Image: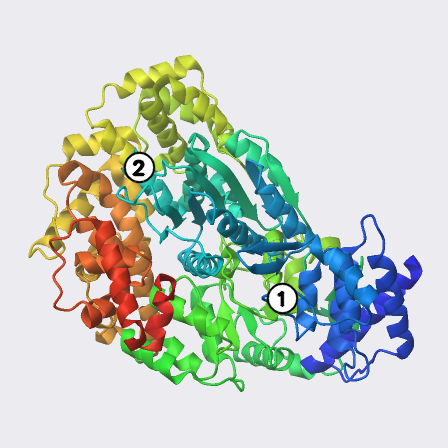
């Protein structure tokens, strides 16, 4: 049977390769499934699915996916075969795709051939069936293991391919438990896009499950009721801020979920603060006795049980699978001599299938180093041929390139979203590049999109209103953009290589390819590599493992960096020297040590050892003694945990200037400029200035422009007003729009407040200035809406539309204001424009 299985697989792969090549326009080869192949396939599926121990689920899913894709459905009805085989191996959910009559409410398939088949399949399926309220759900074996484990295991580590449904079953189980138990949920996500998606998912499922007395929030508030079931969905920055600002943070019994845990990998990089914040947030929860359960989850994490044990100090239940309900296929174009070939990679075969391209003239842009007109034509041809009738993601190395590719892509037959174009034109500018690309059914998605654009664009994509989306690495952060196909040129995250140019790792490449294919929608997801030779020539990609589904080993502490720089770190600590610009590679470790010692005293030795920093008790005692000499209040140090306490002490002793209390003050710009010049020119603070202020805005006129834009943003000026000048006109203006949005959303809203926070904590801790800058609004009501998760431009619109003339100044409690906001939005919901409504759906 093994020989037959291999032969059947190879024949189906050959059919798929030929049909894919033909669809791409590369050959005229036509190969169809014969009656004999169908019969042999049925035998293999029946045999493999009846194996009691360790049937090859990947083989079954692969064969079913290929057969369903290429069979003549009028001649062969294989629906019942698929339901039986997938039910036997514990993946009944994948059979839902082929059954149009599947009953979602009852979780049941349509009739099979006989009563015996019905009973047999039901017996297999009942093991994977769960109920929440009166709703039945079918789970895979893997999902059911997680479901059961969440009833009793303290820490769960979940590692699975992108489409395995791990996030859904976690959400479903939390809803089931919240029906009968009173606890809080803290759900950590890496990006604002994913935050919105998870918030909407919770809101939908909690209502469906009939859960009562709950409150979903993206920020922590001390005034939230202990009787409520609080669901905090937040980024790591929001979570760590809650710990810094309040001793009462997350003090009720809770379950912690950390999604996309692979992001802690970059804690070993001195330039990545977000990874360190995520790791430090998890460590904070480690020492909270009220944390009842912890779930960490990510794609293809190596030994995730050890990751959990190392971070939290407790044995972790390992839930790992390499089985994906969606078959991921990779196709690449490769030149050998003067001939071109299409290669097909499948995880079940050792070697790729190869087919020579009959019409190399249509891929004239192959091998171009930059994004030339020829390459764009080549890309457009492949997307429009291979991706016809589907949703496609085109990977771009940079945000600027994503925009250029979207502009250059030739249009398809997509329906034009005129009202969305008009919305972007009114809220940003008429020459905003997305307005141009959407007319062709093409969009781009990167980190420079304003939040209201990102929210509405993702909604339009999920509703299949946009066919082609050009994406940067934002796609790797768990954002659920549905697509059947992903197009990737090469692994380079640059246009012209420099010494520090980044590359997609083979792990990131595997996750990117895994974005093709939608759970419960597609049997096959396809990735198209446009230039295989660029991968072969890139470090980290082995010829024999070129497009394999590799796993990632995660660091679980600061041990590697500490051991590497142990000697200079020890020297700085002994001499009590402040962290300065010469310590860029290891300065954050020194700050971490001093902050830990300051807060926990002699107990800090054990805590630091838990994260890989091994100091002697003598060293800790010496640091304690030296920190006793600083004058800055400890509370200020605690609130600025990524600053060296000695640097904070320098600011406390030497900064005598004034600061703006609100962005509305007449002299706010000059005062802010004075603060920034002090931070730039003081040796001890220069490294933090360089860390948070981009190079082009550090000095002179550019810094002045940054301050002016920051004040407009903090006052609550609408984005289309901020972008109204001549600087944003014409073709160059399109790029300036993106650059300014990036400045506002990254530097003004994030970097600048972190840089200024120590001085405000010292001089005027009650000032709203930094909050205004972070959120982009002065009015308290508008700020409340933004903190609730409503995009800034939408909050400004709602303030004028449904709150104008309403005075809420007498209400000081943020929770009370939030309740009023929710009620008012519900009352006015159906009067709002469609693209505004989709941004506030999670509140309804």
Residue 207 tag number:
none
> In the rendered structure, are the residues bearing label 1 and label 2 in contact, judged by CB atoms less than 8 Å apart?
no
Question: Mark 1 to mark 2: distance in Å?
Answer: 42 Å
The residue located at (27%, 71%) in the rendering is 828
Along the viewing direction, whichever of 558 and 43 lies nearer the viewer: 43
Along the viewing direction, whichever of 663 and 38 lies nearer the viewer: 38
Up-down: is 812 above or below 801? above
Query: Judging from the image, what secondary structure is the residue with disc 2 in?
Result: helix
Residue 520 tag number:
1
Residue to which mark 2 is pinned: 244
Q: Give the x, y percent position of residue 784.
A: 24, 56
Q: Give the x, y percent position of residue 370.
A: 53, 70
Question: Residue farthest to the left?
Answer: 666
Quadrant (top left, top right, bottom left, bottom right) of the N terminus: bottom right
Q: Mark 2: few, some, or many residues within 10 Å (few <14, many ≥20)?
A: some
Is residue 532 toward the left or the right of residue 238 in the image? right
Q: What is the tally of numbered marks visible in this picture?
A: 2
The residue located at (60%, 56%) in the rendering is 165
Q: Give the x, y percent position of residue 47.
A: 88, 60
Query: Judging from the image, what secondary structure is the residue with disc 1 in?
Result: loop
Query: In this rendering, does residue 503 appear at all?
Result: no
Question: Of the residues under marks 1 and 2, which one precedes in the sequence?
Answer: 2
Up-down: is 255 above or below 168? above
Tell me the mark number nearer the camera, choosing from 1 and 2: 1
Up-down: is 487 above or below 752? below
């Amino acid at each position: 049977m093994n020989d037959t299985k291999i032969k059947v697989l190879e024949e189906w792969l050959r059919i798929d390769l030929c049909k894919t090549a033909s669809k791409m326009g590369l050959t005229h080869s036509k190969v169809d499934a014969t009656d004999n192949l169908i019969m042999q396939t049925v035998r293999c599926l029946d045999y493999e699915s009846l194996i009691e121990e360790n049937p090859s689920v990947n083989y079954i899913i692969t064969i079913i996916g290929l057969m369903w894709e290429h069979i003549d459905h009028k001649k062969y009805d294989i629906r019942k075969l698929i339901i039986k085989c997938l039910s036997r191996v514990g993946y009944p959910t994948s059979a839902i795709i082929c059954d149009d009559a599947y009953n979602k409410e009852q979780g049941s398939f349509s009739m099979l051939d006989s009563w015996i088949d019905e009973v047999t399949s039901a017996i297999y399926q009942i093991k994977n069936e769960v109920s929440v309220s009166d709703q039945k759900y079918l789970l895979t074996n893997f999902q059911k293991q997680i479901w059961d484990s969440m009833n009793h295991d303290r820490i769960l580590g979940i590692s699975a391919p992108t489409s395995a449904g791990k996030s859904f079953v976690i959400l479903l189980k939390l809803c089931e438990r919240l029906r009968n138990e009173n606890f809080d949920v803290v759900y950590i996500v890496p990006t604002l896009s994913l935050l919105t998606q998870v918030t909407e998912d919770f809101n939908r499922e909690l209502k469906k499950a009939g859960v009562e007395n709950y409150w979903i929030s993206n920020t922590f508030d001390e005034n939230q009721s202990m009787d409520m079931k609080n669901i905090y969905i937040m980024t790591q920055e929001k979570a760590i801020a809650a710990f810094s600002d309040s001793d009462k943070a997350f003090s009720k019994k809770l379950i912690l979920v950390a999604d996309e845990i692979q992001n802690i990998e970059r804690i070993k990089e001195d330039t990545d603060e977000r990874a360190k914040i995520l790791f430090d947030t998890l460590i904070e929860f480690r020492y909270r006795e009220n944390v009842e359960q912890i779930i960490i989850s990510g794609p293809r994490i190596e030994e995730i049980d050890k990751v959990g044990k190392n971070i939290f100090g407790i044995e972790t239940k390992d839930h790992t699978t390499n089985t994906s309900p969606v078959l991921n296929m990779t196709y690449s174009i490769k030149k050998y001599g003067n001939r071109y070939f299409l290669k097909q990679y499948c995880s079940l075969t050792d070697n790729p299938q190869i087919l020579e391209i009959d019409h190399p003239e249509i891929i004239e842009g192959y091998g171009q180093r930059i994004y030339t007109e020829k390459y764009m034509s080549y890309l457009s041809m492949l997307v429009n041929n291979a991706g016809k009738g589907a949703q496609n993601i085109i990977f771009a190395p940079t945000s600027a390139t994503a925009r250029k590719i979207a502009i250059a892509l030739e249009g398809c037959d997509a329906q034009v979203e005129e009202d969305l174009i008009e919305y972007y034109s009114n809220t940003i500018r008429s020459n905003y590049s997305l307005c141009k690309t959407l007319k062709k059914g093409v969009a781009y998605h990167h980190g420079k999109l304003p939040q209201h654009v990102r929210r509405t664009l993702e909604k339009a994509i999920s509703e299949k209103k946009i066919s082609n989306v050009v994406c940067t690495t934002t796609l790797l952060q768990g954002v659920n953009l549905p697509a059947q196909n992903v197009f990737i040129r090469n692994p380079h995250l640059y246009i012209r290589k420099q010494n520090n140019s980044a590359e997609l790792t083979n792990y990131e490449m595997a996750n990117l390819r895994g974005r093709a294919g939608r759970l419960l929608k597609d049997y096959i997801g396809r990735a198209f590599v446009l230039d295989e030779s660029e991968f072969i020539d890139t470090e980290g990609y082995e010829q024999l493992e070129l497009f394999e589904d590799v796993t990632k080993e995660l660091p679980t502490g600061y041990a590697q960096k500490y051991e590497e720089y142990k000697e200079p770190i020890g020297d700085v600590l002994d001499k009590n020297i402040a962290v300065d610009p010469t310590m860029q590679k290891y300065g954050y470790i020194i700050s971490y040590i001093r902050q830990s010692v300051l807060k926990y005293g002699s107990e800090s030795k054990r805590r630091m050892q838990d994260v890989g920093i091994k100091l002697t008790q003598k060293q800790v005692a010496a640091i304690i003694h030296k920190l006793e000499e600083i004058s800055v209040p400890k509370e200020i140090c605690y609130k600025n945990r990524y600053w060296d306490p000695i640097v904070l002490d320098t600011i406390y002793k030497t900064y005598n200037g004034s600061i703006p209390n609100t962005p509305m003050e007449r002299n706010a710009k000059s005062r802010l400029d004075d603060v920034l010049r002090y931070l730039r020119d003081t040796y001890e603070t220069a490294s933090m200035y360089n860390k948070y202020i981009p190079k082009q805005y550090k000095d002179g006129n550019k810094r002045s422009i940054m301050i002016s834009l920051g004040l407009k943003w903090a006052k609550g000026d609408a984005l289309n007003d901020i972008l109204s000048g001549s600087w944003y006109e014409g073709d160059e203006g399109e790029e300036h729009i993106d650059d300014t949005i990036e400045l506002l959303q990254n530097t003004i809203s994030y970097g600048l407040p972190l840089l200024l926070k120590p001085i405000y904590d010292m001089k005027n801790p009650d000032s709203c200035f930094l909050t205004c800058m972070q959120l982009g609004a002065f009015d308290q009501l508008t700020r409340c809406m933004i903190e609730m998760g409503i995009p800034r431009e939408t909050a400004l619109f709602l303030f004028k539309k449904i709150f104008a003339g309403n005075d809420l100044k007498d209400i000081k409690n943020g929770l009370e204001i939030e309740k009023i906001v929710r009620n008012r939005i519900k009352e006015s919901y159906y009067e709002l424009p469609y693209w505004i409504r989709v941004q506030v759906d999670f509140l309804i």
